[in-house]
Image (cartoon, rainbow, N blue to C red):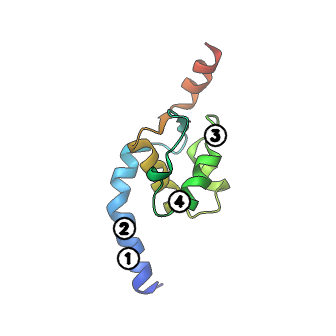
Amino acid sequence: RALGPDGDALRARWADDLPRIKTAIPDLRHVPVRARARVAPRELPIDAEAMVDVLRLIDGTRPVYHLLQESVFPRFIVLRMLYQLTREEVVRMTVPGRVALARAA
């Protein structure tokens, strides 16, 4: 099914970004945990609305796949926002069992 010029551009962008995203988020079961309390307004991307939605969903307990299900934004956008947040060290990805151990300690 052809998506037209915009769809082709989106596919090309997805293909370009996917290897970087997979490096930062190797498993959708990983849990994003806030490393910094705040994101300065100047750090918000052009699609700030998507970033705010993703930040709202990060609670340190839900894995990435839950965020993908709960966000109002498409999968690619959510993954791209999570990638940007990890790159800027606003969040870090943790293995689910390690989150539980860290909370117990």
Other residues around mark 3 within 10 Å, as few (<14) / some (14–19) / many (≥20): some
Name the amino acid, label 3: Arg
Closer to the N terminus: mark 4 or mark 3? 4
Give SS at disc 3.
loop
Name the amino acid, label 1: Ala
Q: Is residue 16 above or below residue 85?
A: below
Disc number lying in front (4 or 3): 4
Identify the mark at residue 13; answer none if there is no mark: 2
Q: Which residue is mark 1?
A: 9
Nearer-the-camera pick, 47 or 101: 47
- Where is residue 31 drawn, in percent x and y? 56, 37
Give SS at disc 1.
helix
Q: Which residue is mark 3?
A: 62
Please indicate whether residue 19 sits to the left or right of residue 47 in the image. left
Nearer-the-camera pick, 37 or 33: 37
Name the amino acid, label 4: Ala
- Distance (Cα) linking label 1 and label 3: 31 Å
Disc number lying in front (4 or 2): 4
Please indicate whether residue 24 sits to the left or right of residue 39 in the image. left
- Where is residue 101 drawn, in percent x and y? 59, 19
Name the amino acid, label 2: Arg
Q: Which residue is mark 4?
A: 48
Q: Residue at x 62, y 23 (%)?
A: 100
- Distance (Cα) linking label 4 and label 2: 19 Å
- Distance (Cα) linking label 3 and label 2: 27 Å
Closer to the N terminus: mark 4 or mark 2? 2
